Amino acid sequence: MITKSLNKEIDMEMVNRSAATVLLLCLSSMLIASEAYTPIAYGTKSRGMGSVGIANVQGAESGFSNPALLAFTDGNEVSSGGTYTKNDVNADIGIVIYTLNGNVIRSDYTSSESTLSPYLCANYHITDTISIGAGVTDYLLKNRLYTTTGTFDIEIGKTRVSLPVSYRLYGFSMGATLIYERMRYETDNGGIVDDDSSGDFGYEIGMGYRFQDLGLIVAIDYRSEIEHMFSDADNINSVSELGVGVSWTLFSTPHQVALEYKRLDSSNVYTDTSTQLTTQDQDVFAVGYMYDAEIWQFRTGYKYVSAFYDDDLFGGVMDFGMPFATTSHYTLGGSYMFLEGFSADLAIVYATYEHKKTVDGLGSLYSVENDPLSLSVGVNYRF
């Protein structure tokens, strides 16, 4: 995406291919832990509670987080909503010069872009022990770079369709989800890549156990790697995820707490590439709290995401061109039941990230600060 210029000749075909790889890598679906360009969670309830969802039941939204929990839901439900995100980026790369598709990137700038990410999900109990669901999410990911000759806009749209099924036997539940994803990519100013990925399939499996008398649920969830194939760039793979979680309703009170941990394996992020990129696995920690007054709920939480790359020049280039690795996420949310069966959800997420580094051998300090703020709204009908 971004290549470093040191006053020497560079093969532009190689530059453009490397640029496409890094651009797509930045926004590949493995970055679900981010907040600037992909949601930390899909549903509004989960977003308001620090993104936890592996072990706490959240109605139809549970199909996004752990299919095993659908069998623990009360009744059937349809949920719909969306997330509006405003992302503010401040960048300063000192004396280091970068070029993007032949345009010199300004050494410092402030950018503010907005996106809207809708979702729709549902669950249905076929029997007392078997439940099925469906979920669709679609969102537009955007960034704008400022060059000496104008602006360079980058847009990625990604659609995900998930079909979960769950089976419960007493306190034990297991589930599986078939996942389909498709990414579309557009750039202006002579765009490096304008392409769609081929249809990409993956799966998710989960298990959970509910200790009814204790108000305790423990669960585990695994999501497979998904390969995204582009004709104009190298293949970009979403990484596999393994997560564990626990939720506890304290002594049958209105108070619920939830904890979860995920490990994102980035060893196969890209394949068949001429671009040598250094990546590392991500650790994700989340904690959430909910006060349940039946007719209304209050939620809050915190999520931490470790860096996706080693702390080297590549990390800085990723930061500057497509800042995505927000590390700390602070959330607030709530729900209110207006009529029997009808309720609405609200969530606010503020994420922060700042990266500063002195480039070895150049004595140049760059810094990138990324502070997205998002508002999510959802409506639910239970029957």
Image: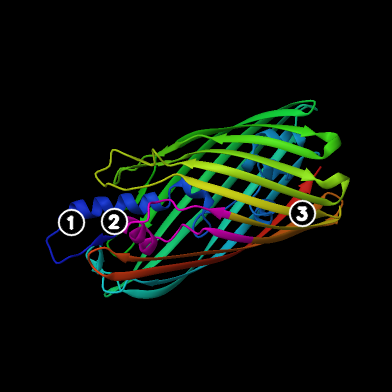
CA–CA distance in space, label 2 to label 1: 11 Å
Which of the two residues, 283 or 205, is positioned nearer the viewer here?
283
Residue visible at 33% across and 48% down in the picture:
278
Instruction: Give the quarter of the image for residue 83.
Output: bottom right
Give the alpha-carbon distance from disc 3 to disc 2, as whole Å: 45 Å
Question: Given contact means CB atoms under 8 Å apart, are the residues at marks 2 and 1 in contact?
Answer: no
Mark 2 closeness class: few <14, some 14–19, many ≥20 residues within 10 Å: many
> Can the viewer see residue 155 in this picture?
yes
Q: Residue at x 48, y 34 (%)?
A: 201
The numbered mark, 2 or 1, whose residue comes first in the sequence reads 1
Residue type at tag 1: Met
Q: Which residues are magenta?
A: 304-330
Query: How many C-alpha atoms fall within 10 Å of the one at disc 1: few (<14), some, or many (≥20)?
Result: few
Identify the residue position indicated by label 1 in the image: 12
Q: Position of residue 146 (x, y in %)?
A: 34, 72
Q: Is residue 326 magenta?
A: yes
Residue at image mark 3 = 290
> Is residue 73 visible in this depiction of the protein?
no
Read off the residue under disc 2.
Answer: 192
Pointers 3 and 1 in contact (CB under 8 A)? no
